[in-house]
Every structure is written in structure tokens, then in C-alpha cells.
Image (cartoon, helix red, strand yellow):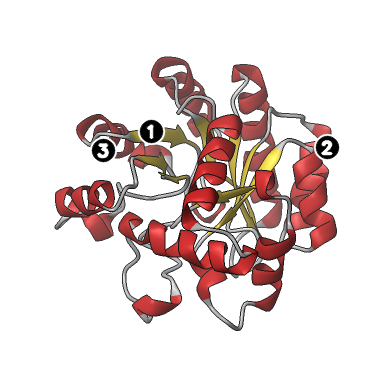
């Protein structure tokens, strides 16, 4: 299985990262995509993926971190993309949910990172929170080679546009809540070839963790939820979502 979005380098795992990784491998999660969120954390992301088998890095500046970023960070990101051969540029995007974030500053860093992804012919890992249409607007302007719309929570029409632009849609813990009716409907009805699995560990824990720390070892149970929604076996879901992840992130 491939966890297409797992912050294994996060501080929440500093005390037991080795055990968390071992549990993921034991659960059948053989590949973890680890997206960076800020230039200051690039070295830790690099060290994490170097130390733990099956991990692959993405480098980018997350919209929640752009208020601390400076334009020179984009030059640093370019250097890392050239030197490290990551599987994607990410985590990048727009967040219009969290208060106190300058939308124009977010858009500047998002657009500049899309240009970098285009320059390096890399897919992107998108953070999309209450900003689907603004993100689609920029993706139409700056065409990249696709990627993943992480934690997708838009409409079916918006999903179809992402798919047309070469993106897969990430489903994880939010799908496991019975009250997440729109997400669960999308998971059940979208073309299977457009779906990838993710945990976003340590965030977005599935329903059974009762708000506790999420881990990549939860991915098989998340796959079971998707299988149940679609009336499929876990094996069929795993085979399809793994193939989808390798298609949109060929570097893994």
C-alpha cells in the first residue's frame, strides 16, 4: 500500500518515529510520501526519508507557513528540487479556512511553486481548504503534470475538473466518519482510477481514533472503509489505488 500523504517527519513522531514506521511496514504500507511544509524543515524531511525504508520526499512551502516565508525561500526550494530529485512539489496550495493568513501572499507563493513544478516537470501535492475554485483557476493558468488534491472535499463538478487536469484525489480519515456524507459519496461514486489513499498522519485521524494521533499503519483500515463504500474487496481497492499513486507520482 502507498500512503500518499504522511508527515512522518513531524514533531509528533519525534519520540517513537522508528516504531511508527515499523508498524506501518508491518501493516503492509510499503511506501510513504513525506511532504515538507517549510524551508526550515527541508533537512529534517530529507533525513527522515533517508533513514526509513520506503519513504519518498516532496518539498514545498505549505500555505499555513507562508506568513513566515520570504521570497528567497523560493530560490532555496529551487535548489532542493534540483539536488534531491523529489517525487513532487508539496505540500503547496491555498487555505481560506484558517484566519490570519494573507490570501495574496498565499497566492504568490502558490503560483511561484507551480512555476517551479512546471520547470522541473514534477507533480504537485495540493493543500485545498475552502479554496477549490481559486486553486483550479491557477492550475488552468500554470499547467503542471498533475499530482494529488490532498484531503479532497469539493464538489463532484470540481473533482471532475481536477481529474481532467491530471490529478488524483486523496481520501483518508475524513471519509471514515458517517457524517461526512459528501466525502463518502464522492469516494463511492468517483472513477476508481481517480482515487488515492492517504493518512495525513499525524493529522486527520479516522473515526476510530477518537481524535488521537493518526499513523500510517491506519491506512489498511481506511482502505477497508473505501472498499465498503464501493462494494469491493480491500485487495481490489489496494491494487487500484496503488496503481493510481504510481501513475500520478511516477517518482515513487
Q: Mark 1 points at which residue?
A: 56
x then y, percent, for residue 102: 64, 57
Q: Can residue 211 be seen in this view?
A: no
* Quarter occupied by the C terminus: top left
Which quarter of the figure has residue 241?
Answer: top right
Q: Is residue 57 visible?
A: yes
**Residue at the (37%, 50%) spot, across then down:** 7
11 to the left or right of 165: left
Label 3 sits on a secondary structure element that is helix
Q: Name the residue under label 2.
A: 140
Q: Residue 48 carries which label?
A: 3
For label 3, the crowd category at 10 Å Cα-Cα, with few meaning under 14, some 14 to 19 and many 20 or more, is many
x then y, percent, for residue 122: 59, 25
Foreground tag (1 vs 3): 1
**Residue at the (60%, 36%) spot, across then down:** 124
* Quarter occupied by the N terminus: top left
**Residue at the (67%, 43%) spot, across then down:** 193
Amino acid at each position: 500500500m502507498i500512503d500518499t500523504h504522511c508527515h512522518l517527519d513531524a514533531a509528533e513522531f519525534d519520540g517513537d518515529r522508528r516504531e511508527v514506521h515499523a508498524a506501518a511496514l508491518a501493516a503492509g504500507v510499503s511506501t510513504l510520501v513525506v511532504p515538507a511544509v517549510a524551508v526550515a524543515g527541508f533537512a529534517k524531511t530529507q533525513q527522515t526519508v533517508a533513514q526509513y525504508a520506503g519513504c519518498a520526499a516532496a518539498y514545498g512551502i505549505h500555505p499555513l507557513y507562508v506568513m513566515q516565508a520570504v521570497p528567497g525561500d523560493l530560490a532555496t526550494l529551487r535548489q532542493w528540487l534540483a539536488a534531491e530529485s523529489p517525487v513532487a512539489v508539496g505540500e503547496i496550495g491555498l487555505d481560506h479556512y484558517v484566519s490570519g493568513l494573507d490570501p495574496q501572499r498565499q497566492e504568490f507563493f502558490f503560483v511561484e511553486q507551480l512555476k517551479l513544478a512546471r520547470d522541473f516537470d514534477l507533480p504537485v501535492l495540493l493543500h485545498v481548504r475552502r479554496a477549490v475554485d481559486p486553486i483550479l483557476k491557477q492550475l488552468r493558468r500554470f499547467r503542471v503534470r498533475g499530482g494529488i488534491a490532498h484531503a479532497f472535499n469539493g464538489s463532484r463538478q470540481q473533482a471532475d475538473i481536477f481529474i481532467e487536469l491530471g490529478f488524483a484525489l486523496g481520501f483518508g480519515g475524513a471519509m471514515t466518519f458517517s457524517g461526512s456524507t459528501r466525502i463518502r459519496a464522492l469516494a463511492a461514486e468517483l472513477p476508481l482510477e481517480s482515487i488515492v489513499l492517504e493518512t495525513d498522519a499525524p493529522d486527520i485521524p479516522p473515526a476510530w481514533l477518537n481524535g488521537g494521533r493518526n499513523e500510517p499503519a491506519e491506512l489498511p483500515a481506511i482502505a477497508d472503509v473505501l472498499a465498503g463504500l464501493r462494494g469491493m474487496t480491500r485487495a481490489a481497492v489496494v491494487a487500484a489505488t496503488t496503481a493510481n499513486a504510481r501513475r500520478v507520482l511516477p517518482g515513487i
